[in-house]
Image (tube, grey):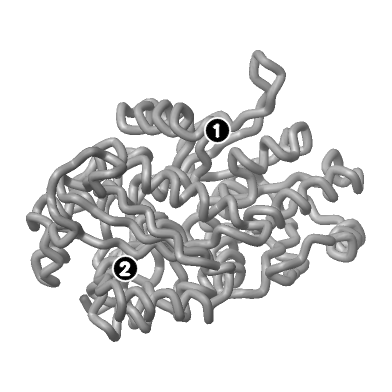
C-alpha cells in the first residue's frame, strides 16, 4: 500500500507559516485493513483530532504525522519503520494496535534510538525486565484490562468459567491477566486463531462444559463475529459473559445490537465520563468524523496529548533525557481522567464496570456503572530496573 503522509502542519492544510524542518515527524504505524482495520482507523483519527485542535501542532510544536497500514503483518511493520527511519529521519513513533506487530517492530526502534509511544498494544514482554527507557504505553499493559474483568467476575460470584482468546501474545496476556484476579475454577482454556471468524466449534465446546460464565477476548471483527454467533447459538440467555473493552466497545455494540445486552464489561474509559477533557473529545470526534468514538479513538487522542505535553516541555526537541523526563510527568488532561506512568513506562489507572443498555432512542449503548479497580499497576513493573 502506498505510504499515506498526513502533513498536519503543512501550510496548505492549516495555513501556517514555518518551514518543514521546524516540524517534528511522527511515524504512525497502524492496522487499517483486515476485519480489525477500524481499530487503527479510530486510533489514527483520535491522534489526528488532537493535532487538528492545535492547528497542526502538539504542545505548540508543529508536527508532521506519517501514517501507513501494517496490514496486521509484523514484517510490514518492520519494513515501514525502517523506511521512515532512513528516508524520513523519523525518531518518534506511535500507532501499533496488535502485540505481534509491536513485538517485531519495537526492538528495532529501540536499537535505533527512536522513541515509541503506544496507543494500544502493551505486551507483557516489554513491561518487565526488558523494559526500555524510550518505550511508553499510553493505553494499558495487556494483562491489566483483563485483570479488571477477572476482578469483576470474582465480584459477581462466578465459580466456574471457560476462557477464550486468540493464540498470540495479547491473547496469552489476556488469559494470564484474567486468572490473576479471578480466583475461581477455570474449567477450559480455548485458544483461537488471530484471523478466525467462525466460532461454532468453540461455542459447542462451551455448551458441553456448562460453565457459570465465559470470558472471551476477541477485538474488532472477531468480536463482532463471536457475539453474533453466541446469540444465535441460544447460549446468551443461559451462560453469562464477562469481557474487557476490546471485546465490547462502541463499534461492536453498534454492530451486534441486542446481542450485547446482559454482557458484563470493564474499561478504563467510556463516552459518558464527565471530565471536561472527555466531553470535549467526544463532541469533537463526533463532529469531525460523524461517528461515535471507541476506546481506540480515546487512546489515540490521549497518546497525542501525552506526546504534546512532552514536546511542549522540551520545545520540540527529542533529546532523550529531556523528553523522557517530560513524558514521565504525564502532564496532560486525558479523556480517562487520572493517569500516571509507572517506572516501566506503563499506566497506573482506574478500571470501571460498564453495561450495555438501551437508550431512549432504542439503540444499545455502553453505560458506566461504577469502579472495579483503583490505581491498578501491572505485575511486571517490579522487574523493570529503570
Q: Is residue 7 left or right of residue 72?
A: left
Q: Secondary structure at mark 1?
A: loop
Q: Secondary structure at mark 2?
A: strand
The residue positioned 61% from the left and 66% from the top of the image is 175
Q: Is residue 355 above or below residue 317?
A: above
In front: label 1 or label 2: 1
Q: Residue furthest top?
A: 360
- Sooner in the amino-acid sequence: mark 1 or mark 2: 2
Using the rendered view, name the quadrant where residue 178 is placed: bottom right
In terms of depth relative to the viewer, which is nearer, 379 or 319? Answer: 319
The residue positioned 41% from the left and 49% from the top of the image is 299
Q: Tell me the CA gap for discs 1 and 2.
A: 28 Å
The disc placed on residue 116 is 2
In terms of depth relative to the viewer, which is nearer, 329 or 224? Answer: 224
Q: Which residue is mark 1?
A: 291
Please rate how many residues cluster around mark 2, counting C-alpha atoms within 10 Å: few if below 14, some from 14 to 19, many from 20.
Answer: many
Amino acid at each position: 500500500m502506498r505510504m499515506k503522509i498526513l502533513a498536519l502542519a503543512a501550510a496548505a492544510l492549516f495555513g501556517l507559516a514555518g518551514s518543514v524542518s521546524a516540524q517534528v515527524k511522527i511515524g504512525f504505524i497502524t492496522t487499517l485493513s483486515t476485519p480489525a482495520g477500524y481499530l487503527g482507523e479510530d486510533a489514527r483519527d483520535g491522534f489526528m483530532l488532537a493535532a487538528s485542535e492545535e492547528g497542526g501542532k502538539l504542545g505548540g510544536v508543529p508536527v508532521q504525522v506519517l501514517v501507513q497500514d501494517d496490514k496486521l503483518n509484523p514484517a510490514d511493520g518492520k519494513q515501514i519503520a525502517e523506511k521512515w527511519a532512513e528516508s524520513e529521519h523519523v525518531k518518534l513513533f506511535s500507532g501499533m494496535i496488535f502485540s505481534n506487530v509491536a513485538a517485531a517492530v519495537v526492538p528495532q526502534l529501540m536499537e535505533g534510538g527512536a522513541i515509541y509511544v503506544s496507543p494500544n498494544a502493551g505486551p507483557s514482554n516489554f513491561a518487565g525486565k526488558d523494559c526500555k527507557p524510550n518505550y511508553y504505553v499510553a493505553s494499558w499493559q495487556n494483562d491489566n484490562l483483563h485483570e479488571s474483568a477477572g476482578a469483576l467476575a470474582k465480584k459477581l460470584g462466578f465459580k466456574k468459567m471457560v476462557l477464550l482468546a486468540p493464540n498470540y501474545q495479547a491473547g496469552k496476556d489476556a488469559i494470564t491477566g484474567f486468572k490473576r484476579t479471578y480466583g475461581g475454577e477455570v474449567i477450559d482454556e480455548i485458544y483461537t486463531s488471530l484471523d478466525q471468524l467462525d466460532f461454532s466449534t468453540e461455542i459447542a465446546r462451551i455448551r458441553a462444559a456448562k460453565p457459570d460464565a465465559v470470558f472471551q477476548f476477541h477485538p474488532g471483527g472477531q468480536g463482532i463475529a463471536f457475539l453474533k454467533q453466541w446469540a444465535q447459538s441460544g447460549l446468551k440467555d443461559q451462560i453469562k459473559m464477562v469481557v474487557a473493552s476490546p471485546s465490547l466497545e462502541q463499534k461492536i455494540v453498534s454492530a451486534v445490537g441486542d446481542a450485547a445486552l446482559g454482557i458484563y464489561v470493564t474499561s478504563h474509559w467510556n463516552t459518558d465520563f464527565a471530565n471536561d477533557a472527555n466531553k470535549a473529545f467526544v463532541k469533537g470526534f463526533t463532529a469531525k468524523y460523524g461517528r461515535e468514538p471507541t476506546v481506540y479513538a480515546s487512546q489515540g487522542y490521549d497518546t497525542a496529548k501525552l506526546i504534546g505535553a512532552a514536546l511542549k516541555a522540551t520545545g520540540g526537541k527529542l533529546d532523550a533525557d529531556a523528553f523522557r523526563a517530560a513524558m514521565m510527568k504525564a502532564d496532560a488532561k486525558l479523556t480517562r481522567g487520572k493517569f500516571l506512568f509507572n517506572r516501566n513506562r506503563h499506566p497506573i489507572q482506574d478500571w470501571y464496570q460498564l453495561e450495555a443498555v438501551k437508550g431512549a432512542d432504542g439503540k444499545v449503548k455502553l453505560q458506566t456503572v461504577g469502579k472495579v479497580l483503583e490505581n491498578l499497576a501491572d505485575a511486571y513493573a517490579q522487574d523493570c530496573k529503570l
